[in-house]
């Protein structure tokens, strides 16, 4: 994040995101100057606007045309309110803002490993956001990369390279959202390696809701997983998940690590809820560490790992990941000057800026796309 005074031709850009954890809309307001390798970003405000538990459940259970149609517009209303809230937080007016970049809420993500028709679907109607705020919206960022032969994910490597590269150094930027993903960035964008490492908080979140009968939406402060003991045979079974054997580029979603998997685990081991939570935490840590050992550490001399996402607020995950990757240093992203909870929303503010600039912002070495393309669709 660049704190220098930015030139007057910079843009005020909002980034909106509801992640795979489906617990809140993250909204940021940024001032962005330039484009491509010279881009500079200053974060002006960040808000996290939680969903009510019943709305989270509505998102997770939507599975027919009517419910998805209604959900698309309902999510648009939530995103619009988050945009207006972050504008107010920063002391600006809607007419000051140049563009909103909205990732939306992913409800289906089907790369070639899961479907003969690779496809992806994010909801959160851009027309609703534009109408409520009066601001142009760029949305639907994944689809152009998929059309170009890519997985449509991960998209954050472009931000990781733009903001966090350091000359002569190779860094790993690890996100622990619902799904875990890593970007390895060095001097050149085309050398960036990025892929989904596997489960982040998604399995833990689903089991936490069942363990507490909906009282908790996540393994808050690691309190649930700390009470249990890992079930070794179940952990090894989970680590045999076919996704974890795929070489990069690869991307994952609820199809592999969502409610269907959680339901199977609960049916078999629901009488041992805390052991199940401990095993899920170990699954996330071990899947992440093995991804590093197989695909990254043989190729790169990493300076450190910088972690963002909701998983940073789970001390069980952070402590055990640091132990597992030692002696490689593991830090939270905050040490680089970016609040970890804001990072992914900042990515979509940047991608909206790049759309308006006509700058391609996918990273083919990460997604597998045939070429670099301009991402997103503009709703004026």
Image (tube, grey):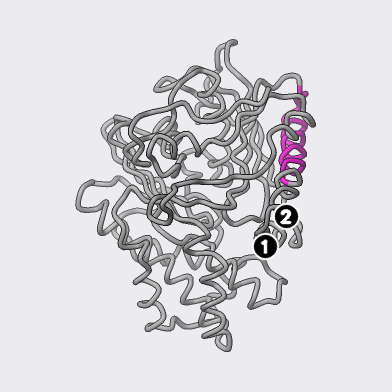
**Residue with the mark numbered 2:** 67
For the residue labelled by badge 1, is the local secondary structure a helix, a strand or a loop? helix
Q: Answer whether residue 317 is magenta in the image.
A: no
The 10 Å Cα crowd at callout 1, few under 14, some 14 to 19, many 20 or more, is few
Which numbered circle lies on residue 61?
Answer: 1
Any mark on residue 313, and which?
A: none
Query: How far apart are the two marked residues, 1 and 2, measured between alpha carbons?
Result: 9 Å
Magenta stretch, main secondary structure class: helix
Residue at screen point 42% across, 30% down: 162
Check contact, mark 1 vs mark 2: CB within 8 A. yes
Query: Percent position (x, y) of residue 139?
Result: 60, 33
Q: Position of residue 188 (x, y in %)?
A: 29, 29
Q: Nearer the viewer, residue 214 or 372?
A: 372
Residue 15 % position (x, y): 61, 34
Secondary element under disc 2, as helix, strand or loop, is helix
Q: Quadrant of the C terminus?
A: top right
Asked whether, in this view, residue 166 is left or right of residue 134, the answer is: left
Residue 80, position as x, y percentages in the image: 74, 37
- Residue 130 found in image quarter: top right
Along the horizontal axis of the image, is 312 left or right of 291? right
- The mark tally for this picture is 2
- Frontmost of labels 1 and 2 is 2
Residue 51, relative to residue 5: is it above or below? Answer: below
Which residues fall within the magenta stretch?
Answer: 75-94
Is 93 part of what is drawn in magenta? Answer: yes
């Amino acid at each position: 994040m660049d704190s220098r005074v930015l030139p007057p031709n910079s843009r005020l850009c909002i980034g909106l995101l509801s992640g795979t954890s489906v617990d809140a809309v993250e909204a940021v307001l940024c001032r962005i100057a330039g484009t491509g390798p010279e881009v500079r970003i200053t974060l002006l405000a960040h808000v996290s606007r939680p969903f009510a538990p019943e709305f989270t459940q509505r998102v997770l259970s939507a599975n027919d045309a009517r419910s998805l149609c209604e959900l698309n517009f309902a999510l648009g209303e939530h995103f619009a309110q988050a945009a207006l809230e972050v504008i107010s937080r920063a002391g600006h007016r809607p007419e000051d803002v140049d563009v909103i970049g909205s990732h939306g809420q992913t409800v289906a993500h089907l790369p070639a490993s899961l479907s003969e028709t690779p496809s992806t679907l994010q909801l959160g109607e851009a027309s609703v956001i534009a109408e409520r705020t009066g601001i142009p919206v760029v949305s639907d960022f994944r689809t152009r990369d998929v059309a170009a032969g890519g997985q449509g994910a991960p998209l954050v490597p472009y931000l990781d390279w733009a903001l966090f590269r350091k000359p002569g150094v190779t860094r790993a930027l690890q996100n622990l959202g619902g799904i875990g993903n890593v970007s390895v960035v060095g001097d050149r964008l085309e050398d960036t390696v990025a892929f989904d490492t596997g489960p982040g908080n998604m399995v833990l979140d689903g089991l936490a809701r069942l363990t507490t009968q909906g009282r908790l939406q996540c393994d808050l402060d690691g309190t649930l997983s700390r009470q249990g003991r890992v079930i070794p045979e179940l952990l090894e079974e989970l680590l045999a998940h076919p996704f974890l054997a795929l070489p990069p580029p690869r991307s994952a979603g609820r199809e592999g690590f969502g409610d269907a998997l959680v339901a199977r685990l609960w049916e078999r081991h629901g009488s041992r809820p805390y052991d199940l939570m401990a095993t899920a935490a170990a699954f996330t840590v071990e899947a992440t560490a093995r991804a590093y050992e197989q695909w990254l550490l043989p190729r790169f001399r990493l300076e450190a790992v910088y972690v963002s996402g909701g998983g940073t607020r789970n001390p069980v995950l952070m402590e055990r990941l640091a132990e597992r990757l030692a002696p490689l240093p593991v830090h939270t992203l905050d040490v680089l000057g970016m609040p970890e909870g804001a990072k992914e929303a900042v990515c979509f503010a940047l991608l909206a800026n790049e759309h308006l600039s006509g700058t391609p912002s996918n990273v083919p070495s990460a997604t597998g796309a045939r070429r670099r393309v301009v991402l997103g669709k503009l709703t004026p």
